[in-house]
Image: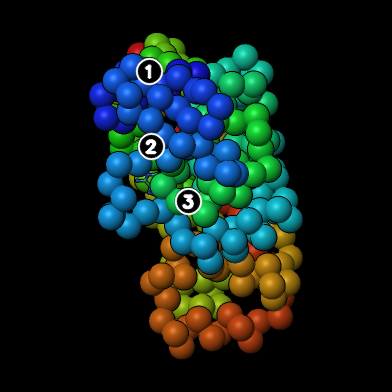
């Protein structure tokens, strides 16, 4: 996969530990293996260390393996794949494709991802300004992350597919029953993207019994960790184990 210079949009060429374009803009490859193409360094960027570590602990126990397996049913070895907001690469590193690029704004996430997965090109960049060429990808994925609609459509080939993963109504409902006086189910609405047609919608779910540590990690990796009051958070600490529903929607779109 060719990468574009974030400054002048020319192709970046890799030479040992650096990517450089014909205009002399150069970007060092970090020790772990990712390249930082993000130009706006002062802005807040991506998930923090605590969130990334919690997600890593949780995902590495393979509770979401059934989601990964379902996604891989729609991905082939020949696909040129781009994972937008790849986090610490749990899914990216396990996708079947041989040509993979993972993009995220979290340095900590990409450190983990690129340290252990040398088969994927990991780029620190905003998913709203992707340093890749128009029509370069067969498959683009976004898993539990913001949807960069215009960039997704731009980088997909004609007939390429966009796979969007988001929580379904019942996702983590039992955890919300512990946390909140009035637990709520997630609102689900159809997401329309100009230039793409929704081809298929899959709903998959599974239950698991989680111990205290797993519950803690799961909570930290969700948006609830930012929105829950201190007193509600304490309720989870007094919970030694819980049977929890994992429920996901996979929307598969085709570029027209
Ligand atoms: C909930 S995490 C999901 C990570 C991964 N897809 C997964 O499921 O394990 C959301 C990710 O989106 C990234 N993110 C949020 N806004 C972003 C942006 N504008 N550009 C790139 N990454 C972004 C965060 O850094 C974080 O890694």
The answer to whether residue 216 is left or right of residue 19 is right
Question: Which residue does the numbered mark 3 point to in the structure image?
Answer: 107
Identify the residue under disc 2: 37
- Which of these two is toward me, 203 or 47? 47
Q: Quadrant of residue 203?
A: top right
Q: Residue at x 45, y 27 (%)?
A: 19
Q: CA distance from mark 3 to mark 2?
A: 11 Å
Q: How many numbered badges does the structure rendering display? A: 3
Instruction: Decide which of tag 3 and tag 2 comes sooner along the chain.
Output: 2
Q: Is 22 drawn above or below residue 224 in the view shown?
A: above
* Residue reaching furthest to the top: 158
Residue 205 in view (yes/no): no
- The residue under the point 31% across, 50% down is 41
Residue shown at 43%/40% (left/top)?
36
- Upstream in sequence: badge 3 or badge 1: 1
In the picture of the structure, the residue carrying the numbered disc 1 is: 11
Q: Position of residue 210 (x, y in %)?
A: 71, 67
Name the N-terminal-most of marks 2 and 1: 1
- For the residue carrying disc 2, how many other residues have a C-alpha within 10 Å: few (<14), some (14-19), or many (20+)? many
Measuring from the top left, give residue 207's x and y in whole percent: 69, 57
Residue 196 coordinates in the image, percent (x, y): 35, 22
Q: Nearer the viewer, residue 64 or 90?
A: 90
**SS label for mark 3:** helix
Q: Kindly check if marks 3 and 1 are in contact, taking CB atoms under 8 A apart as contact.
A: no
Q: Tell me if mark 3 has few (under 14), some (14-19) or many (20+) residues whose alpha carbon lies within 10 angstroms of its own.
A: many
SS for callout 2:
loop
């Amino acid at each position: 996969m060719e990468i574009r210079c974030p400054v002048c949009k020319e192709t970046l060429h890799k030479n040992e530990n650096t990517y450089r374009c014909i205009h002399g803009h150069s970007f060092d490859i970090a020790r772990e293996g990712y390249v930082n193409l993000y130009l706006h360094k002062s802005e807040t960027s991506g998930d923090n260390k605590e969130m990334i570590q919690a997600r890593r602990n949780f995902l590495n126990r393979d509770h979401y393996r059934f989601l990964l397996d379902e996604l891989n049913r729609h991905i082939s070895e020949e696909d040129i794949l781009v994972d937008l907001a790849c986090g610490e690469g749990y899914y990216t590193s396990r996708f079947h494709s041989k040509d993979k690029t993972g993009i995220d704004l979290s340095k900590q996430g990409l450190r983990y991802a690129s340290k252990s997965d040398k088969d994927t090109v990991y780029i620190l960049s905003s998913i709203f300004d992707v340093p890749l060429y128009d029509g370069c990808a067969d498959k683009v994925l976004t898993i539990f992350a913001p949807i960069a609609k215009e960039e997704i459509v731009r980088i997909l080939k004609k007939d390429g597919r966009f796979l969007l993963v988001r929580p379904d109504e019942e996702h983590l409902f039992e955890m919300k029953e512990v946390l909140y006086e009035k637990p709520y189910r997630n609102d689900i609405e159809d997401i329309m993207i100009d230039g793409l047609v929704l081809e298929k919608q899959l709903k998959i779910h599974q239950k698991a019994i989680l111990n205290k540590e797993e519950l803690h990690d799961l909570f930290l990796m969700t948006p609830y960790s930012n929105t829950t009051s201190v007193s509600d958070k304490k309720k989870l600490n007094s919970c030694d184990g819980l049977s929890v529903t994992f429920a996901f929607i996979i929307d598969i779109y085709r570029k027209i």
